[in-house]
Image (cartoon, rainbow, N blue to C red):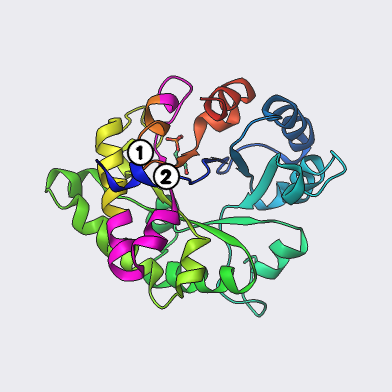
Amino acid sequence: MHASMTNNTRKKIVAGNWKMNVLPSQVTEFVTELRNRISGTDVDVVICPPFVCLPAAVAAAQNSGLSTQDSGLIKVGAQNMHWEGTGAFTGEVSPNMLTDLKIEYVIIGHSERRQYFSETDETVNKKIHTALMYGLKPIVCVGETLEQREQGITYEMLRMQTRLALQGLEDEQVRSIILAYEPIWAIGTGKTATPEDANNAIAAIRGVVGEVYGQDVAQQIRIQYGGSVNAGNAKELFGMPDIDGGLVGGASLKADEFEKIVRY
Ligand code: 13P
């Protein structure tokens, strides 16, 4: 029996990465609708709007009168941040700006940031250290390109990215991180990894965490799958023993579809 099957008490977490979509003027209505749709679910639900939408998103998520932390409803995350707390970094957003807004999560190392904005394993690692120092929960993305998959080096890539991302962290810090396996060829393409493939890759990532931080941490850390998740495939994917939920792009922009994913 797979190790995770014997000890899977991990709470599922479904996060919507809105990327560079949705306008500030649309956020309040959208988050309010989502909040109403997902109430009563036993899943952590996080939305990650663009920076300029964050204040309105937090306000709408909190409108229940409870903090997002207590309400069990929608939690809010950013899509990126700088690795310094403050300073002369024109155009950047710092972790303490996010915590000042009561943001809880931050996506770090998304493949689009690695591909288009020179994010490296080194900056990913720095950002994770800083995010944790400021009390943010990082959602750390790893994943192979199509070329790497075809060359048969998927697991080597995943092992290396995971090790470098987590370098120098304490056990306790690693427990609060969310990892997201996002094969780059599956992002925005409509092609999804098969549930077995995604589960095996995530089990391999969990294996690396186990080698470095021990089985206890490896069994606690939550690892999502991302890449063309939709209402039709969420159930099969999230039903796999090592897959602890999803990081959803396109389908998180449609309230009815995102609700179906959350209620898989
Ligand atoms: P899609 O769900 O649109 O493929 O995007 C996945 C993703 O990149 C989430 O971060």
Depth check: give the residue in front, 226 or 188: 226
| Label 2 close to label 1 by CB (< 8 Å) | yes
Residue drawn at 56 percent across, 73 percent down: 130
Residue 40 visible in rendering: yes
Question: How many residues crowd around disc 2 within 10 Å: few (fewer than 14), some, or many (20 or more)?
Answer: few
Q: Report the side of 232 relative to 206 (left or right).
A: right
Report the span colored magenta. Answer: 206-235
Residue drawn at 67 percent across, 53 percent down: 51
Depth check: give the residue in front, 81 or 234: 234
* 247 in magenta: no
Q: Secondary structure at mark 2?
A: loop
Depth check: give the residue in front, 237 or 85: 237
Q: Quadrant of residue 253?
A: top right
Judged by depth in the image, the label closer to the viewer, 2 or 1, is 2
Q: CA distance from mark 2 to mark 1?
A: 7 Å
Q: Which residue is mark 2?
A: 8
Question: How many residues crowd around disc 1 within 10 Å: few (fewer than 14), some, or many (20 or more)?
Answer: some
Q: Quadrant of residue 23?
A: top right
- The amino acid type found where label 2 is placed reads Asn
* 224 in magenta: yes
For marks 2 and 1 on the same chain, the one whose residue lies earlier in the sequence = 2
- The amino acid type found where label 1 is placed reads Pro
